[in-house]
Amino acid sequence: MSLGVDVEEFNRWMLMARRTLESARGDAERGDYNWACFKAHQASEFAVKAVLYGVGRPVSGLSITHLLSALGGIVQVPGDVLDLGKFLDKFYVPTRYVDAWSEGVPYEYFTADDAEMAIKAAEVIIGFVEDLWRRLLGGVRS
């Protein structure tokens, strides 16, 4: 496979992914579980966009599931990674919007376990992206 790569652009997006994941961990430690879940989603979104931008195929959108599907032309995404994307996509709206719930406010609905699972899912997706990037760079000829 012959792809042009933009290492600088990949690194910009991955820096944001890693910093956002660290922020999610801090939120979880403080008990801000809804924000930890949301930021785990964001970190994963940034990571997948990193590789898409890095290979010159930027895709807009916020769904990790759809972003991972956009990688289909580059690599076969494992089913477990796609499932984690679907899991994290469920945190995009209800973690932040009061009107996503018929009663109460978002922080009342999320637990330490939710935050832990979301952060672990983000770690797997980020790891997948980093491994994919290493493999892509290994195939690049200067």
Image: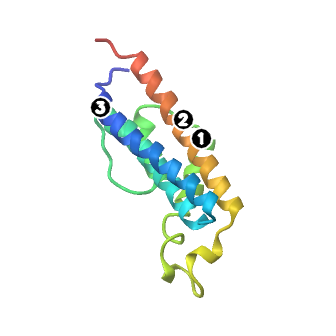
Q: Residue at x 53, y 64 (%)?
A: 35
Q: Residue at x 33, y 20 (%)?
A: 2
Q: State if disc 2 and disc 1 touch (CB < 8 Å).
A: yes
Visible residue check, residue 21: yes
Q: Position of residue 60 (x, y in %)?
A: 32, 52
Q: Tag 3 or tag 1, which sits nearer the N-term?
A: 3
Q: Nearer the viewer, residue 96 or 70?
A: 96
For mark 3, does the 10 Å Cα neighbourhood hold few (<14), some (14 to 19), or many (20 or more) residues?
few
- Compared with 67, 89 (above or below) is below
* Residue most extreme to the top: 142
Q: Residue at x 33, y 39 (%)?
A: 12
Instruction: Locate the N terminus and report the quarter of the image it occupies.
Output: top left
What kind of residue is marked 3? Glu
Q: CA distance from mark 3 to mark 2?
A: 19 Å
Q: Position of residue 96 (x, y in %)?
A: 49, 72
Residue 95, located in which quarter of the rendered image?
bottom right
Which residue matches tag 3?
8
Q: CA distance from mark 1 to mark 2?
A: 6 Å
Indicate left or right for 123 with 3 as reference: right
Q: Nearer the viewer, residue 50 or 36?
A: 36
Q: Tag 2 or tag 3, which sits nearer the N-term?
A: 3
Q: Position of residue 48 (x, y in %)?
A: 44, 43
What kind of residue is marked 2? Phe
In the image, which is nearer the foreground, mark 1 or mark 3?
Answer: 3
In the image, which is nearer the foreground, mark 3 or mark 2?
Answer: 3
Which residue matches tag 2?
128
For mark 2, does the 10 Å Cα neighbourhood hold few (<14), some (14 to 19), or many (20 or more) residues?
some
Visible residue check, residue 69: no
Which residue matches tag 1?
124
What kind of residue is marked 1? Val
